[in-house]
Image (spheres, rainbow, N blue to C red):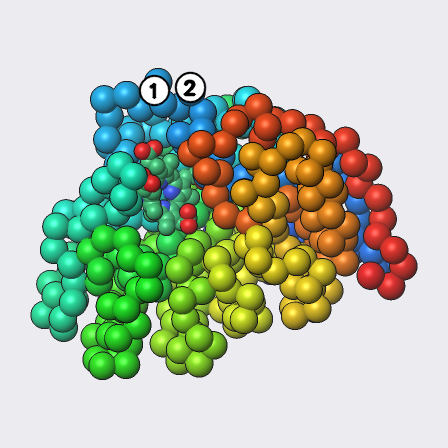
């Protein structure tokens, strides 16, 4: 965690500097603040937010987005800000996540990238060679203007509720750049790191730089925390992650360390590399639905605050089944220094938003009690 003096590099009106978000349940848990007895300080309510809480599960989102492409919506400050606010108003979640996308830095750098509905990010020219990497454009800081404007507008409306900024981790971003489109096994980038390691490192360095600066732009403009998404890191073994990826994720995170904002690192299928993801420089580890939180605490130690990990598949189950699962996640997370409830991956577009609101009510209704002694 960054020292508090480093906050002076954020502007004086920043919510972390004025203290507006400092006492929020979210930051309290992200900081894992233990009292003198070693137990986490109880927040006044248990914090919860959902990855992809903004988006297609919400009818108000679908209406607003009609006729506007995904990336154009991200770069329209008024629209991006309104979409960010929609789930906060509707669900009473404890954080907003900035509405944007991991490929926005590519678009801002002038790369031909679109998000194709029901497919995902597609690049006009995949980056597969040294020449391709050397031809990558330089991303100008001024290009972040629509992002900082959207963040500024959002933070004004949020009051004491923190905004979370984010970026794609270098491996996940580079996977799209090499494949040129979503893929299941990410063979392209995994081959490149062995067949042509210099090109891989140059590409991952470029991705770390643009993602790190994207997060920094959001934090400087008013976000109180940031999350690095390494959604596809689960396709890597430990050895490959350690040798070819970890240093680049660390480089991305280094752009935002020392600001006093908690940093969350999340991936899916990453049970085998949780410790390496923390070592990359994160304060909080996001856990997908495959690893139980008490097991994650065994792997990471009790000092690491966790985020997660309600299984999105259960949103469609009968309420008693879902309720039991949510209660188990709460119990399972109580051994960690801090716990922020979330899903184990994003809200499915087919999710019923009323169920999400009910899950938030349930989580807020469970007393934030002190976990058992010795936890
Ligand atoms: O609410 C939030 O979580 C904030 C917004 C957010 C989006 N993308 C909006 C979005 C965030 C944090 C992301 C990150 C992102 N984008 C990741 C990492 C998180 C994850 O889900 O693993 C990845 C891998 C991407 C790339 C991407 N963008 C994909 C795979 C898709 C889905 C394509 C599809 O149509 O199924 C997108 C598009 C996207 N990003 C949508 C949203 C709301 C859907 C676009 C739409 O509304 O039509």
Q: Position of residue 371 (x, y in %)?
A: 84, 52
Q: Is residue 39 visible?
A: yes
Circle 2 — which element? Answer: helix
Q: Position of residue 46 (x, y in %)?
A: 72, 39
* Residue receiving disc 2: 60
Ligand 1: quadrant of the figure: top left
The image quarter in which residue 67 lies: top left
Q: Which mark is residue 152?
A: none
Mark 2 and mark 1: span between their CA atoms?
Answer: 6 Å
To which residue does mark 1 refer?
Answer: 64
Q: Is residue 317 left or right of residue 106?
A: right
Q: What percent of the width, then of the height, locates residue 117?
A: 26, 36
Residue 28 visible in the snapshot: no
User: What residue appears at the point 55 percent right and 54 percent down from the top-left corner?
Assistant: 288
Direction from residue 146 to residue 83 in the image, left or right: right
Query: In this orientation, which residue lies closer to the viewer: 185 or 177?
Result: 185
Does the beta carbon of the residue at mark 1 sit less than 8 Å from ligand 1?
no
- The kind of secondary structure element at disc 1 is helix
Decide which of 109, 313 is in the foreground and name it: 313
Crowding at dot 2, Cα within 10 Å, few <14 / some 14-19 / many 20+, comes out as some
Q: Quadrant of residue 228?
A: bottom left
x and y, in percent, of residue 151 in the image: 41, 34
Residue contact at pointers 2 and 1, CB within 8 angstroms: yes
């Amino acid at each position: 965690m960054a020292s508090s003096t480093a906050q002076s590099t954020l502007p004086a009106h920043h919510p972390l500097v004025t203290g507006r978000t400092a006492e929020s349940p979210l930051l309290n848990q992200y900081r894992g603040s233990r009292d003198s007895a070693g137990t986490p300080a109880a927040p006044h309510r248990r914090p919860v937010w959902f990855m992809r809480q903004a988006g297609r599960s919400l009818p108000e989102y679908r209406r607003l987005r009609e006729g506007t492409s995904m990336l154009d919506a991200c770069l329209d400050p008024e629209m991006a800000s309104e979409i960010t606010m929609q789930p906060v108003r509707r669900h009473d979640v404890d954080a907003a996540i900035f509405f944007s996308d991991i490929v926005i830095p590519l678009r801002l750098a002038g790369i031909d990238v679109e998000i194709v509905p029901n497919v995902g990010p597609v690049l006009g020219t995949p980056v597969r060679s040294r020449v391709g990497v050397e031809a990558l454009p330089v991303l100008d800081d001024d290009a972040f203007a629509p992002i900082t404007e959207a963040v500024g507008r959002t933070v004004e409306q949020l009051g004491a509720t923190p905004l979370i900024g984010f970026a794609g981790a270098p491996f996940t971003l580079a996977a799209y750049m090499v494949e040129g489109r979503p893929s299941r096994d990410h063979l392209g980038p995994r081959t490149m790191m062995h067949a042509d390691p210099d090109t891989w490192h140059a590409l991952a360095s470029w991705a770390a730089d643009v993602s790190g600066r994207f997060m920094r732009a959001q934090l400087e403009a008013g976000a109180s925390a940031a999350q690095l998404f390494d959604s596809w890191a689960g396709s890597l073994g430990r050895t490959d992650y350690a040798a070819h990826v970890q240093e680049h994720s660390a480089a991305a995170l280094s752009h935002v360390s020392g600001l006093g904002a908690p940093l969350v690192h999340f991936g899916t299928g990453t049970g085998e590399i949780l410790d390496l993801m923390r070592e990359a420089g994160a304060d909080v580890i996001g856990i997908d639905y495959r690893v139980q939180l008490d097991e994650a605490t065994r792997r990471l130690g009790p000092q690491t605050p966790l985020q997660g990990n309600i299984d999105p598949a259960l949103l469609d189950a009968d309420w008693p089944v879902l309720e039991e699962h949510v209660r188990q996640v709460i119990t399972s997370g109580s051994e960690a220094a801090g716990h922020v409830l979330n899903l184990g991956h994003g809200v499915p577009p087919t999710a019923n938003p009323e169920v999400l609101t009910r899950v938030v009510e349930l989580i807020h209704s469970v007393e934030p009690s002190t976990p058992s002694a010795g936890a």
